[in-house]
Image (cartoon, grey):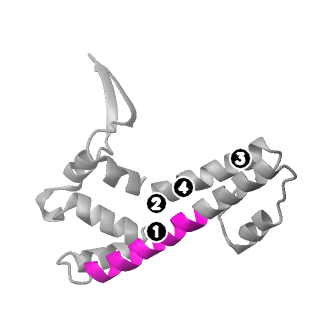
């Protein structure tokens, strides 16, 4: 997934450097892909580079879909599959995110309360205290980075 995001960012950066800025937020739907197909470059080197970036995005997207299909088949026999299915019901958590969370967190019963789970993931606020003065900051970023990245 990180490879696909990186390839998309490189393509968008290339377009921006060459006078084709992306307007607004692009969600890589069919309309955006048609827009990309309409872009033409006069210089052969830029044309080749642009085609390479398009090919890289397409290849990585297909690879990610293939991995998801294989993972779907493998996880059906997994003892945590019911938990994966339950997590996919939640808004914002799709299959790959649910599998990642379950694989990273393991048995959720090992956490005695939600606070210990949040501490494990690193989603607790940092604190700067001195005497009676108490100030809280952003999240601590300690703990399991993969699970935290999925949740944020």
Q: Which residues are magenta?
A: 57-75
* Residue 23 visible at all: no
According to the picture, the residue beneath numbered tag 3 turns out to be: 14
Q: What residue sits 34% from the left and 72% below the top?
A: 87
Q: Residues under labels 3 and 4: Cα distance?
A: 14 Å
Measured as percent of width and height from the top left, residue 5 is found at 54, 55
- Name which of mark 1 and mark 4 comes first in the sequence: 4
The reply to whether callout 2 and callout 1 are in contact (CB within 8 Å) is yes
According to the picture, the residue beneath numbered tag 1 turns out to be: 64
Instruction: Classify mark 4: helix, strand or loop.
Output: helix
- Name which of mark 3 and mark 2 comes first in the sequence: 2
Q: What residue sits 30% from the left and 22% below the top?
A: 129
Quarter where residue 34 is shown: bottom right
Measured as percent of width and height from the top left, residue 73 is found at 31, 83
Instruction: Classify mark 1: helix, strand or loop.
Output: helix
According to the picture, the residue beneath numbered tag 4 turns out to be: 5
Measured as percent of width and height from the top left, residue 131 is found at 26, 16
Instruction: Classify mark 2: helix, strand or loop.
Output: loop
> Where 92 sits versus 45, above or below?
below
Q: Residues under labels 2 and 4: Cα distance?
A: 6 Å
Q: What residue sits 47% from the left and 74% below the top?
A: 65
Task: Classify 10 Å Cα crowding around label 3: few (below 14), some (14-19), many (20 and above).
Answer: some
- Name which of mark 3 and mark 4 comes first in the sequence: 4
């Amino acid at each position: 997934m990180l490879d696909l995001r990186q390839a998309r960012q490189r393509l968008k950066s290339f377009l921006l450097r060459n006078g084709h800025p992306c307007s607004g937020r692009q969600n890589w739907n069919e309309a955006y892909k048609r827009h990309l197909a309409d872009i033409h470059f006069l210089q052969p080197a830029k044309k080749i580079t642009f085609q390479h970036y398009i090919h890289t995005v397409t290849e990585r997207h297909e690879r990610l879909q293939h991995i998801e299909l294989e993972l779907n088949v493998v996880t059906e026999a997994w003892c945590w599959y019911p938990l994966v299915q339950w997590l996919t019901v939640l808004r914002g958590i799709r299959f790959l995110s649910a599998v990642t969370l379950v694989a990273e967190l393991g048995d959720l019963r090992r956490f005695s309360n939600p606070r210990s789970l949040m501490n494990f993931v690193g989603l607790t606020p940092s604190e700067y205290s001195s005497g009676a003065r108490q100030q809280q900051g952003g999240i601590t970023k300690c703990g399991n980075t993969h699970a935290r990245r999925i949740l944020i």
